[in-house]
Amino acid sequence: MFISHLALDNFRSYEHVVVELAGGANAFIGLNGQGKTNLVEAIAYLATFTSHRVAADTALVRAGSDAAVVRAKVSDGERSQVLEVEILAGRANRARLNRAPVRPRELLGIVHCVVFAPEDLALVKGDPSERRRFLDDVIVQFTPRLAGVKSDYDKVVRQRSALLKSALGQRRAGRTPDLGTLDVWDAQVADLGGQLIAARTQLVEELRPYVAQAYHEVSNGQSEAGIAIKSSLGEIEERAFTDVSYAQAELARQLAEGREREITRGVTLVGPHRDDLILTLGDLPARHYASHGESWSFALALKLASYELLKERDHREGHSGPILILDDVFAELDTARRTTLATMVHDADQVFITAAVPEDVPAELKARRYLVHESTVERDDAQGTGEDDDRER
């Protein structure tokens, strides 16, 4: 798939901009702080309704405005659709599909996109929440309804934990806590959480060979990369958790058995919100033993693996492949990794690259270049080779 037109209103630093784009490689070039990452952030937002830079949508709305609008024309084979999301500060978003109002979640699954950015080093060295988010962003593109499941689960866990904290306070004050609604929250945590556990476990099983292959290529075979789920439910055969009913039943059982311990702590101790994605190089945990270069290679392998898996699924279902975004990446890579990455992505349906200078964009990608300066975007006609004309779709 590819985006042929992108329009932004009051998004980040942009008051208004319209950009015509091409298939193949597109490079946004400009110094730091000029707005190039804001463009690819808007594109990626259409795939998951999340930003790879911030947790809250409020930061996406231009200062002094009440709402931001992201509008894009998306083509998949012979089919084109116009997607529009209105991001409302402090309120629920609104959406349109081909100019008709729809629920925002109805847009999920239309755009498939993978982003790789310097912040992705946190996938290797950062907290478990970074790795859970990585898995969930891929899952939502496979199964859009799970975005609602994840949102509902987070709300239920917050409410259940608030009840446990209140019960702890009542006990400390010498009163008998009111736990009349805890069974209701347990049932919802088990239902929603079991779905997430099963989806994540299945994704990890499917990603595993792609991660191993991608790391082998990016690192020139220096080590063997592995991934596995570490569940808060304990040491249970990983494959068992791909069954939704089993995951739900096991989560319900452990919530019941651990109730006293949770009341004592005042927090929900089991569930997908406490899981982790374990990354290994050989027999060693990458989080503690990977060098800077190995961490870069592993983070890149995770993103390339998710891209390849999305592409395979898309092709199997009769769609064109996902969009790939490389945000300020090539400047961070050594020559060997730059060349390897360029070779691995050169045939993508559409790639977006951000770079501070043209020299950071590998020549072999033959990218159409756009100059970004103070939130204005202009086609770099000076490149003038015409080589990108055959990349139009």
Image (cartoon, rainbow, N blue to C red):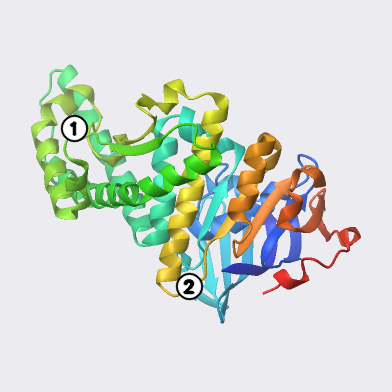
Q: Callout 2: helix, strand or loop?
A: loop
Location of the C terminus by quadrant is bottom right
Q: Identity of the amino acid at label 2? A: His
Q: Callout 1: helix, strand or loop?
A: loop
Percent of width and height locating residue 223: 45, 32
Question: Which residue is depicted at the point 65% across and 38% down?
Answer: 336
Residue 356 numbered mark, or none: none
Percent of width and height locating residue 313: 41, 64
In the picture, residue 177 is in which quadrant?
top left
The Cα atoms of the two marked residues, 1 and 2, are separated by 39 Å
Location of the N terminus by quadrant is bottom right
Would you name the residue on which mark 1 appears? 234
Q: Nearer the viewer, residue 175 or 66?
A: 66
Question: Which residue is depicted at the point 62% across and 62% down?
Answer: 350
Q: Nearer the viewer's eye, disc 1 or disc 2? A: 2
Q: Nearer the viewer, residue 265 or 240?
A: 240
Q: Identity of the amino acid at label 1? A: Gly
Q: Nearer the viewer, residue 333 or 29?
A: 333
Percent of width and height locating residue 6: 68, 65
Would you name the residue on which mark 2 appears? 319
Q: Nearer the viewer, residue 106 or 230?
A: 230
Asked if residue 259 shows in the view, the reply is: yes
